[in-house]
Amino acid sequence: MIEDINWAPKRGKTTMQKKLWKMILIVTIPLMLIIVLVVGIFIGYALQYNSILNNVTTASDFNREFTDNIKTKMYYFVIDSQYSEGLPIEEVKSAEAIATKLIDTTAEKDSLRAINSVLNLCHNLEDKMQEIAETEGYDSRMSQLNDNIYVMADLIQEYMYTYLYYEAVHLDVLQSTMLTNMIVLMCVVVVLALALLYVLLSYSRKLSRSIVDPIDMLCERLVAIGRGGLLVCEPIQADVEEVQLLSDGIENMVVHLKRQIDRNAEQEKERRRTELALLQAQINPHFLYNTLDTIVWLIESGEISESVKMVGSLSNYFRFSLSRGQNVITLKEEQQHIKSYLEIQQMRYRDLMEYEIDIPDELKRYILPKLTLQPLVENALYHGIKVRRRKGLIRVQGRIQDDSVILEVSDDGCGMTAERLAEIRASLEDERSEGFGLRTVHQRIRILFGGDYGLSVESTPDVGTRITVKIPMQTNEKEMGT
């Protein structure tokens, strides 16, 4: 008897989920920090580069149009030309707005100094335009135009060029710095990535070994169990809680499975012994009743010698029927059974029945349940030959087919209708009242040999019936595992 085994609880086990989360955090946190750092640096450089580039673009547009427009419009104003549109104050205001905008977006000191000069000159230029407008006399106005307006316009252009120069230099320096820093940053990222990869590989290898090795041992254990190795073993030791629980569960399962298999085997043996004895007990009185009835009929008919002969046949039948108390006999002994039975019945039904027994000698060493063929021969006589009320033939034959022994009991009696045949076939598989003898024989064969063996019935009305018995080619009870 296998007792329950309670394995000692394992301490310090970690779940697989925790181990996987730890591995994920080891990789993802540094990786996210690196990504945030790289993205932040890239965005900073991009914004700075874009700001300087916008400043350069704005200043280039300003230089290209402003100076020429101011000089032309002021000249037309001073000479009082018909093309004059008045003082170009709006152009100066627009230039001041652009300069103010550039001041807000400029960070380089030299560039900031130049753009502040542009803004101051724009203010002075506006004042000088007002002075020309208030001055009378062509010469005085031309003098102010040459000495003030043209000079300031040129200075504004010069300072704007200076601003462009410094911004271009700053942009070039920024590009060089950005390229250098990005190279350094990429090297740092590669080094950190390699370090993270090494840590990941080391940890994942350790984790995989803590999971895969016990699982491999569990697989080997399950293969051994599948092959019938049900010896109870110590559970596999694993660092992962789930694997440990699985190993403990498998060993507990083996304990219960072994106990259940032993219990089932014992119950099956007992069931087979009980059912076989019960079925055998059901058959013996049935046959004895019919045989004694025949003897009584002969004695009543005054056929003393025939009755004596029948008693001798009956004696031989019971001598083989006892079979030293065994319920499984050889086909040779079973043939002697039915031969004695048919001899007895032929004495009674001499005008109705003939019989033939054709079982090859090579089949007679195989075993089968006692009283397998006798109920079939009896059915052939009482439900086939006798019902038709004319002389008929009962034939018993044997052969080998597909590694099985096939025995056939056939008659040329009245046969069965399709409906009756269906009832008989159904009775072989359930507890119906029809076909008690056939069902009993069928069940005994299946109890001993399994579901692949038993009886099959074929019948045609007014032609006859054939019952086929299929048993394995076994010569002793050890081959059945009983």
Image: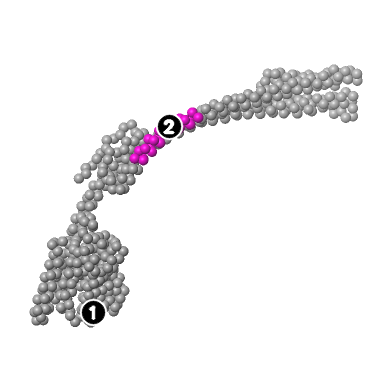
Residue 45: image location, x then y, percent: 62, 27
Give the quarter of the image for residue 121. Answer: top right
- What crowding class fits label 1: few (fewer than 14 Cα within 10 Å), some (14-19), or many (20 or more)? many
As for residue 197 lying within the magenta part, the answer is yes
- Badge 1 marks a residue whose secondary structure is strand
Which secondary structure lies at badge 2?
Answer: helix
Circle nearer the N terminus (1, 2): 2
Residue placed under numbered mark 1 in the picture = 392
For the residue pair 174 and 386, the one nearer the viewer reads as 386
- Which residue is identified by label 2? 203
Snapshot colouring: one colour
Q: Is residue 320 magenta?
A: no
Query: Which quadrant of the figure contains the C terminus?
Result: bottom left
For disc 2, the neighbor class at 10 Å (few under 14, some 14 to 19, many from 20) is some
Q: Nearer the viewer, residue 175 or 92?
A: 175
Q: CA distance from mark 1 to mark 2?
A: 89 Å
Q: Quadrant location of the N terminus?
A: top left
Name the residue: 87% across, 24% down. 75
Q: Residue at x 71, y 26 (%)?
A: 56
Q: Amino acid at mark 1?
A: Gly
